[in-house]
Image (spheres, grey):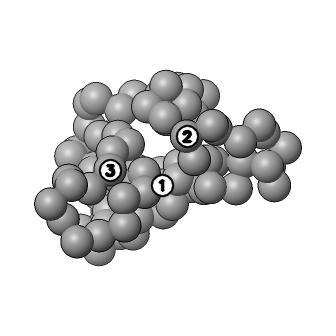
Amino acid sequence: MQTVVELFLAYHGWRSDGGLLAYAETPPWNTPAPRSFQVFVKIRHAAVLVADDGLLPHRDDLKLAEESLAWVLGAIFRYSPDLGFKAAPFW
């Protein structure tokens, strides 16, 4: 999954190990949560989302962007057949 995450980000000019963290993982075994793969995104530097006017985004905007990108990256796997991709065997 991480390879696909990296490829998607690279296509859009981003990396997953700088101002933007994006990674796939599963919850720990001792956590009472579904054991499905999840994608997490953390924007460590607000400059990743600097608008044309040069203003840094508000923390609420960063949180929304993190959640949105995590959803898109997870959806690549969850809805891969609907997108015309082969379904990942582990999904």
Q: Amino acid at mark 2?
A: Phe
The tag earlier along the polypeptide, 2 or 1, is 1
Question: For this rendering, which residue is in front, 15 or 25?
Answer: 25
Q: Residues within 10 Å of mark 3 (few under 14, many from 20)?
A: few
Which SS class for mark 1? helix
Instruction: Identify the mark at residue 26; answer none if there is no mark.
Output: 3
Q: Quadrant of residue 25?
A: top left
Instruction: Identify the mark at residue 34; answer none if there is no mark.
Output: none
The tag earlier along the polypeptide, 2 or 3, is 3
Residue 59 percent coordinates (x, y)? 24, 68
Q: Residues within 10 Å of mark 2 (few under 14, many from 20)?
A: few
The answer to whether residue 50 is seen in the rendering is no
Is residue 87 rendered to the left or right of residue 14? right
The tag earlier along the polypeptide, 3 or 1, is 3
Q: Which residue is mark 1?
A: 69
Q: Residue at x 42, y 51 (%)?
A: 37
Q: Residue at x 43, y 57 (%)?
A: 36
Is residue 55 rendered to the left or right of residue 32? right
Q: Are marks 2 and 1 in contact (CB under 8 Å)?
A: no
Q: Residue at x 36, y 59 (%)?
A: 35
Q: Amino acid at mark 3?
A: Thr
Instruction: Identify the mark at residue 90; answer none if there is no mark.
Output: 2
Q: Amino acid at mark 1?
A: Leu
Q: Quadrant of residue 8?
A: top right
Residue 33 percent coordinates (x, y)? 29, 70
